[in-house]
Image (spheres, rainbow, N blue to C red):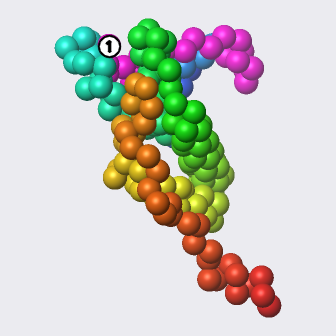
């Protein structure tokens, strides 16, 4: 009997290695992927429709929720679009603050990826270390906005408020430092 090597495989959206809501319809020839058909829209929440009935400022918190891993970066893109439409000039200090928090967001994103990648290969340690460091960065979010995830900190023309007098500092691990001393 002839062996069939060509087949179609549904990958996701609940596949263990497809984090989030990725779905692919894969056409395989043996173990070689010949074609991949991505199905987008599994995370579509109707944000555009919701925003039709709101002011620019009322729509801002939805941007945090478009990608919960890159919250402030989404806010930044949204307020920059509004600023371009309205011809607003952003003060230099606010521009620096935005870039600083975009970089913190990028670090949060990479730490989440690194920790989850460790879990995927069966290593719990990297996940715990990554999330410990994420907590320190989340403290910075909380210091400026009062929220640890969905900050809604950026505003058209600047930011919600200036940086506090004292930002959270990285807390050195007692265990890690004790090992380094020995």
Residue 45 within the segment the image draws in magenta? yes
The residue wearing badge 1 is 48
Q: Nearer the viewer, residue 5 or 33?
A: 33
Place of residue 61 in the rendered image (x, y in percent of width and height, measured from the top left) = 32, 32
> Number of marks in the image?
1
Place of residue 168 in the rendered image (x, y in percent of width and height, measured from the top left) = 50, 63
> Who's the residue at 59% across and 38% down the image?
96
Kindly indicate the quadrant of the structure image that contains residue 100: top right
Place of residue 52 in the rendered image (x, y in percent of width and height, measured from the top left) = 25, 11
Quarter of the image with the N terminus is top right
> Who's the residue at 62% across and 14% down the image?
36
108, above or below 76, in the image: below
Taking the image as shown, residue 156 lies to the left or right of residue 26, namely left
> Who's the residue at 47% across and 36% down the image?
72
Kindly indicate the quadrant of the structure image that contains residue 175: bottom right
> Who's the residue at 41% across and 11% down the image?
86
- Disc 1 is placed on an element classified as helix
Residue 15 seen in the current view: no
Quarter of the image with the C terminus is bottom right
Residue 65 within the segment the image draws in magenta? no
90, above or below 161, in the image: above
173, above or below 144, in the image: below
Q: Which residues are magenta?
A: 28-48
Kindly indicate the quadrant of the structure image that contains residue 106: top right
């Amino acid at each position: 009997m002839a062996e069939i090597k060509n087949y179609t495989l549904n990958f996701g959206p609940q596949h263990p290695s497809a984090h989030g809501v990725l779905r692919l319809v894969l056409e395989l020839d043996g173990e070689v992927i010949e074609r991949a058909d991505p199905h987008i829209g599994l995370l579509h929440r109707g944000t555009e429709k919701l925003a039709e009935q709101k002011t620019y400022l009322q729509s801002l918190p939805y941007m945090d929720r478009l990608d919960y891993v890159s919250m402030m970066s989404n806010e930044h893109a949204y307020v920059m679009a509004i600023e371009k439409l309205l011809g607003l000039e952003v003060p230099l200090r606010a521009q620096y603050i935005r870039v600083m928090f975009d970089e913190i967001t990028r670090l949060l994103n990479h730490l989440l990826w690194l920790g989850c990648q460790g879990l995927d290969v069966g290593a719990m340690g990297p996940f715990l270390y990554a999330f410990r460091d994420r907590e320190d960065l989340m403290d910075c979010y909380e210091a400026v906005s009062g929220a640890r995830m969905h900050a809604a900190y950026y505003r058209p023309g600047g930011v919600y408020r200036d940086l506090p007098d004292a930002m959270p500092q990285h807390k050195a691990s007692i265990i890690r430092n004790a090992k380094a001393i020995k």
